[in-house]
Image (cartoon, rainbow, N blue to C red):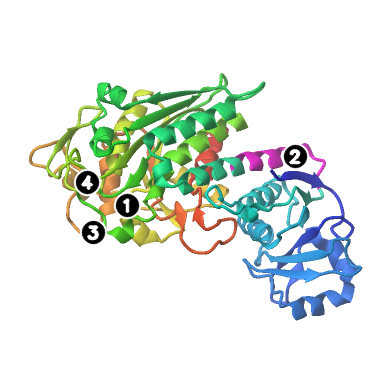
Amino acid sequence: MTSYALRAASPAKTRADAVVVGVVAGDKGPRLCDAAEEVSKAYGRRLRPFLSTMGVTGKAGEAVKAPTRDEVNAPLLVFVGLGEDPTDPIAVRRAAGVAARSVSNAASVALALPSETPELVAAVVEGHRLGGYTFTAYKSSKSETTEPADVVVLTSIARRAEAVAALGRAEVLADAVALCRDWVNTPPGDCTPPLLAELVTAAHKEATKGRGAPKVSLEVFDHEQLAEMGCGGILSVGNSSVAPSRLAKLTWAPKDAVAHLALVGKGVTFDSGGLTIKPSSSMMNMKGDMAGAASVVAATLAIARLGLPVKVTAFAPMAENMVSGTSTRPGDVITMHNGTTVEIANTDAEGRMLLGDALSMAVEEGPDVVLDIATLTGHMQLALGDKVGAVMGTDDQVPAVLAAGVAAGEQHWRMPIPEEMKERITSSKVADLLQHDWVRWGGGLYASAFLREFTGGLPWAHLDIAGKEMNLGGPYGHVPSGATGFGVTTLVEFARALAEAE
């Protein structure tokens, strides 16, 4: 495990295997950021032609390695592009992530990136931790896990308490995102509902052990208990699998809580589509369909570790959507936890069935705000691509989620719930609601309107992260290939803002 520390020292004189310096792009050519001023002085007039020779421009995503002579103590200098605004935490976080992947086989690394404020310190640490993330549990060779033992952030505010606190917060957030990534990356055969529940139990035990650890309660409900509780939505999906459904409920209830937040996350551990079976090409990454559940568990544990004065009740319903003789059929009518009846039209629209039960359970807790997060609809992926999440809900909460996303460095976009969706979801001839219809457009908006029926009129927002849970391309910024952990930091920042608003 890499150890992070702050130090008020010159990057030119710091002893490390590698020194990373941030480069700012500009009309007059690239320049080193303020944190690397001593490196600029060490090179003097030779710096600009040296950068030009090395092809350094300062554009975001750039990383150029250069051996050193007498200018700095480290044998390797890495120039990392910041773009045009070195004060932007998002740009700094991404640059730190690029830096983490650009230095291999170094026992010690010094980071001379913008870090003049606690927010920038946190961006450097969080970005570096997450940019260097790898998942090698199933690799026979572990060479990819090489990471520095010591990383020093070179900052002028190293001795300030708020900077040290920012470093600690960043490590907690990075831990939470990495935990979510680990679970989403795990093969579906090793992450069935019972096995995912065991992973949640183990993570809860680790987070709450020891003196001074936060007190978070955990309840895990099995198939029989869910049946007794009337969770027909969860069971309508999970009954198709030999791996029984589960629901994990975590509660963080600090004595000084100023608000109560309920979190609900979709936990479909593998989605074949059920009888409305998916094309084979669409199944490969369906292990990530439980990213919503992973994110609410990881976020809740992070909120507790940070000691935020917000009560959090998190629900993670888990089911495997398979094809068998016990699969739910199109045309079946299901009774949900709150008594609402739903006619099934498409068994590949299963996530809303889990969320409907869990949302109604969350409402019974009497929270001030309800957020749900899910890899819910391909419609939202088609609309917004693979890096921008959709947010829908009540007018008082959607802006707060968008603001939390900005603070977290995650992109979200507001989408509407048009009034005509009410007519579509209530168009069943035999039940209260129609789970899905075959109108080609507006499927993501339809799904959010369906979920709204289970929120009890409470302040609520729905985060559709379909396509954001897995990065199927190459790494970028602080995001690796594979699981991304998208949404975790937005949920934590939402809780932080909720605490500060009271």
- Write the start and end of the magenta stretch as one range: 157-173
User: In 3D space, how far apart are the residues under numbered discs 3 and 1 (Cα atoms)?
Assistant: 12 Å
Q: Are marks 2 and 1 in contact (CB under 8 Å)?
A: no
Q: Magenta includes 172? A: yes
Graded by Cα atoms within 10 Å as few (under 14), some (14 to 19) or many (20 or more), the crowding at tag 1 reads many
Please state which of the two labelled residues, at mark 2 or mark 1, is closer to the viewer: 1
Q: Earlier in the sequence, mark 3 or mark 4?
A: 4
Q: Are marks 3 and 2 in contact (CB under 8 Å)?
A: no
**Residue type indicated by callout 4:** Thr
User: In 3D space, how far apart are the residues under numbered discs 4 and 1 (Cα atoms)?
Assistant: 13 Å
Residue 397 visible? The answer is: no
Label the magenta part by its dominant secondary structure. Answer: helix
Dot 4: what SS?
A: loop
Residue found at the far right of this picture? 70
9 or 480, which lies in front?
480
User: In 3D space, how far apart are the residues under numbered discs 3 and 2 (Cα atoms)?
Assistant: 50 Å
Q: Earlier in the sequence, mark 3 or mark 2?
A: 2
| Residue matched to label 3 | 441
Graded by Cα atoms within 10 Å as few (under 14), some (14 to 19) or many (20 or more), the crowding at tag 4 reads many
Dot 3: what SS?
A: loop
User: In 3D space, how far apart are the residues under numbered discs 2 and 1 (Cα atoms)?
Assistant: 41 Å
Q: Earlier in the sequence, mark 2 or mark 4?
A: 2
| Residue matched to label 1 | 377
Dot 1: what SS?
A: loop
Q: Residue at x 87, y 71 (%)?
A: 43
495 or 69, which lies in front?
69
444 or 319, which lies in front?
319
User: In 3D space, how far apart are the residues under numbered discs 2 and 4 (Cα atoms)?
Assistant: 50 Å
Q: Magenta includes 297? A: no
**Residue type indicated by callout 1:** Thr
Q: Residue at x 23, y 59 (%)?
A: 441
